[in-house]
Image (cartoon, rainbow, N blue to C red):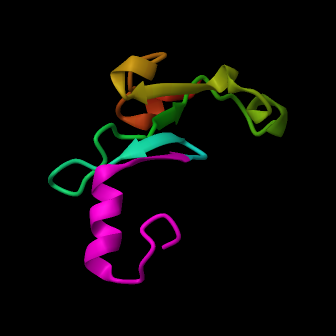
Amino acid sequence: MTAANSLDDEKLAAHLRQNTFDTIIGPIAFGPDGEWVKPRIIYAQFQNVSGNDIGQFKDMSKQVVVWPNELKTGELVHPYEKAAK
């Protein structure tokens, strides 16, 4: 509202469409269809989990990023039962 200097919905929408914004998940910008220009959703799967020891979840060693491709660290295992030891 401050940047658009207005409470008017059309002015706010125009400001959102014309600018990039720094957020906790990185910069975002909106395309002509109103969707993010670059998706910031990350899909991950826990793999090679054994037993119920909570310690194995304290780092990223069991978490594999399966999408988006530029952040991918491994392949999706399906059905999930095959992802556990």
Please give left or right for residue 71 compared with residue 60 in the image. Answer: left
> 44 or 14, which is in the foreground?
14
Question: In x, y percent, where is residue 35?
Answer: 25, 53
Image quadrant assignment for residue 84: top right
Q: Which span is picked out in magenta? A: 1-22
The verdict on residue 73 being magenta is no
The relative height of residue 32 versus residue 9 in the rendered view (above or below) is above
Image quadrant assignment for residue 46: top right
Furthest residue in direction front, as rendered: 5
Question: In x, y percent, where is residue 39?
Answer: 35, 40
Question: In x, y percent, where is residue 80?
Answer: 43, 36
The relative height of residue 7 versus residue 77 in the rendered view (above or below) is below
Q: Residue at 64% across / 25% down in the picture? A: 62
Q: Residue at 73% across / 34% down in the picture? A: 51
Q: How many marks?
A: 0
Q: Residue at 69% across / 28% down in the picture? A: 50
